[in-house]
Amino acid sequence: MKNNFISERVQNIKPSPTMEVTSKARELKEAGHDIIGLGAGEPDFDTPTHIKEAAIEAINQGKTKYTAVDGILELKEAIIDKFSRENNLLYNTNQVSVATGGKQILFNAFQATLNKGDEVIIPAPYWVSYPDMVILAEGTPVFIETKKENNFKITSDMLNKVINERTKWIVLNSPSNPTGACYSKKELIEIGKLLKKYENILILTDDIYEKIIYENFVFSTIAEAVPSLKSRTLTVNGVSKAFSMTGWRIGYAGGPESLIKSMAKIQSQSTSNPTTISQYAALKALTSPSSFLKENNTIFLKRRNLILDLVNSSKGLECNVPSGAFYIFPSCEGLIGCKTSKGNIINNSSDFSKYLLEEAGVAVVPGIAFGLENFFRISYATSNKILEEAGNRIFNACKLLT
């Protein structure tokens, strides 16, 4: 099909780089190559049995019909309880939205609020889909480039430099994808002091990795840290990561009633309700004991430490210690300018990632996909055995560069 049949908005965006890497690794595996894929942002744990059984029970009870566009009442009430119990945030059912994953929540929010030329401030590195969702809504992404030395976090001073009359949203993601960095309550309060001065700016906080944190870090979300901002904050979460329910596709949010209502209108003309069966599974996830989360985090912590040690001992690589999520975001700056055995020059993170894939059989995501060059992302949501093999391959591949 000729490009002139395709809309400008679609031509202005790119496919998800993380999904591209995962797809490429899968293709190479299917072609017989020995590939270790560290690109997917997906826990390797199975969905807990009690959650799967709740879905089966829902099917057997005939709960397979349409529901309210943005979620069944029981699930909304469970989300309200969750926000109250864990985040000290009070919502009613008209202030809660359920969608087909956290991604649709974000998409709906931008579609419901952005006009052409409205700006959305996004700290870099960022989750790959934020900018393209803004562009699809005819908004303009504005990036704040963070530094490794500051653990990839923005400050109120950095934020103040880019705010203007066109700013509609500020996006915060803690724990972060791709860095695993987490904002403390004190840091959120400092950012909140600035945002209090700008009453027309909305705040979107993506808390999808909230429950995956390490070493006694205490999670806080900005509407909790700065209660006066709650009336213009969309607090986004979901069951995908912590509950190992990525394929179930359930995300949710709490926010201002007018925004939630507008998001439901968008959803009514796109997907309609999230899958009914998945909603009942999510209901079980949010209303049942979750001791397995602590066990999973203990496993994740061991994996983090394993891959960190291997990466930080590799020639030219250096990585911060993340406090949450299941990613590390090492710098490969020490290898820029090096030559491969074939005489190719490593000019950037894309070159380095390609080198690891072709020469070491390890698939990672280049940092430029997240808006920050000379870094790359590793997902350690896989077994110790696989991580150790991948880490050794990376170590050996780096040693061969001259």
Image (cartoon, rainbow, N blue to C red):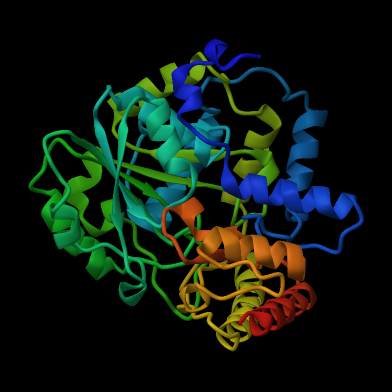
User: Image quarter for residue 182?
Assistant: bottom left
Q: Residue furthest bottom?
A: 313
- Left or right of residue 125: residue 141: left
Q: Is residue 385 above or below residue 283?
A: below
- Left or right of residue 244: residue 91: left
Q: In this view, does 11 lie above or below 375?
A: above
Q: Which of 186 and 132 is in front in this view?
A: 132
User: Image quarter for residue 117?
Assistant: top left
**Total marks in image:** 0
Residue 261 visible in this rendered orientation of the protein: no
Q: Which residue lies furthest to the top in this view?
A: 5
Q: Residue at x 20, y 55 (%)?
A: 226
Q: Residue furthest left?
A: 197
User: x, y (%) of residue 200?
Assistant: 14, 35
Q: Residue at x 22, y 39 (%)?
A: 231
User: x, y (%) of residue 192?
Assistant: 18, 55
User: x, y (%) of residue 29?
Assistant: 85, 55
Which part of the image, by quadrant, shows the C terminus? Answer: bottom right
Q: Which residue lies furthest to the right in this view?
A: 32
User: Image quarter for residue 291?
Assistant: bottom right
- Left or right of residue 284: residue 166: left
Which part of the image, by quadrant, shows the N terminus? Answer: top right
Q: Nearer the viewer, residue 113 or 79?
A: 113
Q: In this view, does 11 lie above or below 53?
A: above
Q: Is residue 299 above or below residue 377?
A: below
Residue 14 visible in this rendered orientation of the protein: yes
